[in-house]
Image (cartoon, grey):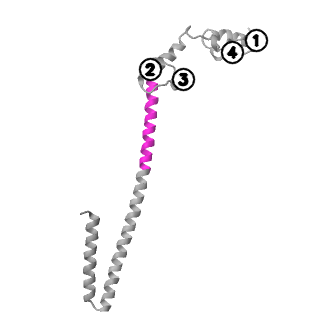
């Protein structure tokens, strides 16, 4: 038998015995008896209402805590991913400015991506012809022309030397 059933059964027995007691009392005593029973029931109803209100508040707090925990887990995952990218960049000698360009879900894929990025920056291995050539007559140089060998020429043309 569950707690609810046992409580209902106890209340039924209690109300039956209360009815028997009331029938044995004088009319004025019966009125007082039932008033007392009504006060007890009212008190119990108020207690139940307060308990329900508190339970609802606790459920709300639990949901809020779950949301905060989920956000904290997300932030921890982001920090761990950033730390892994930084560690891979450090291990591979990749400049810190390029850390955010690393792509991958784990250290191995990040390391492979770092190797690919580093290969692009090795002197003489970057094919710059497909990105546009430096044209002194236009008065500006593409960003890649300022890296490595083209830096001196770009500066000379800018300064008119």
- Residue 161 horizontal/vertical position (percent): 73, 8
The label on residue 91 is none
Q: Is residue 78 magenta?
A: yes
Q: Which residues are magenta?
A: 64-90
Q: Residues within 10 Å of mark 1 (few under 14, many from 20)?
A: few
Decide: marks 4, 3 in contact (CB < 8 A)?
no
Q: Callout 4: helix, strand or loop?
A: loop
Give me the residue at 34% from left, 75% from top.
41
Mark 4, residue position: 141
Task: Characterize the magenta stretch by its predominant secondary structure.
Answer: helix
Label 2 to label 1: alpha-carbon separation: 42 Å
The answer to whether the residue labelled 2 contacts the one labelled 1, judged by CB atoms less than 8 Å apart, is no
Question: Residue shown at 42%/49% (left/top)?
Answer: 65
How much space separates mark 1 and mark 3, taking CA atoms? 32 Å
Rendered-image quadrant of the N terminus: bottom left
Q: What is the tally of numbered marks visible in this picture?
A: 4
Q: Which residue is mark 3?
A: 97
**Label annotation for residue 137:** 1
Q: Is residue 95 left or right of residue 66?
A: right
- The Cα atoms of the two marked residues, 2 and 3, are separated by 16 Å
**N-term-proximal mark, 2 vs 1:** 2
């Amino acid at each position: 038998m569950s707690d609810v059933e046992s409580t209902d059964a106890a209340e039924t027995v209690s109300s039956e015995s209360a009815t028997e007691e009331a029938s044995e009392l004088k009319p004025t005593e019966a009125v007082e008896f039932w008033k007392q029973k009504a006060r007890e029931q009212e008190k119990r109803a108020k207690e139940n209402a307060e308990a329900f209100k508190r339970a609802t508040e606790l459920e709300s707090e639990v949901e809020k805590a779950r949301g905060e925990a989920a956000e904290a887990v997300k932030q921890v995952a982001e920090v761990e991913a950033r730390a892994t990218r930084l560690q891979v960049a450090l291990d591979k000698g990749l400049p810190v400015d390029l850390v955010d360009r690393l792509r991958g879900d784990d250290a191995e894929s990040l390391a492979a991506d770092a190797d690919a990025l580093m290969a692009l920056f090795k002197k003489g291995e970057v094919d710059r012809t497909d990105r546009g050539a430096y044209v002194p007559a236009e008065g500006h140089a593409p960003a890649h022309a300022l890296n490595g060998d083209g830096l001196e020429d770009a500066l000379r043309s800018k300064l008119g030397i």
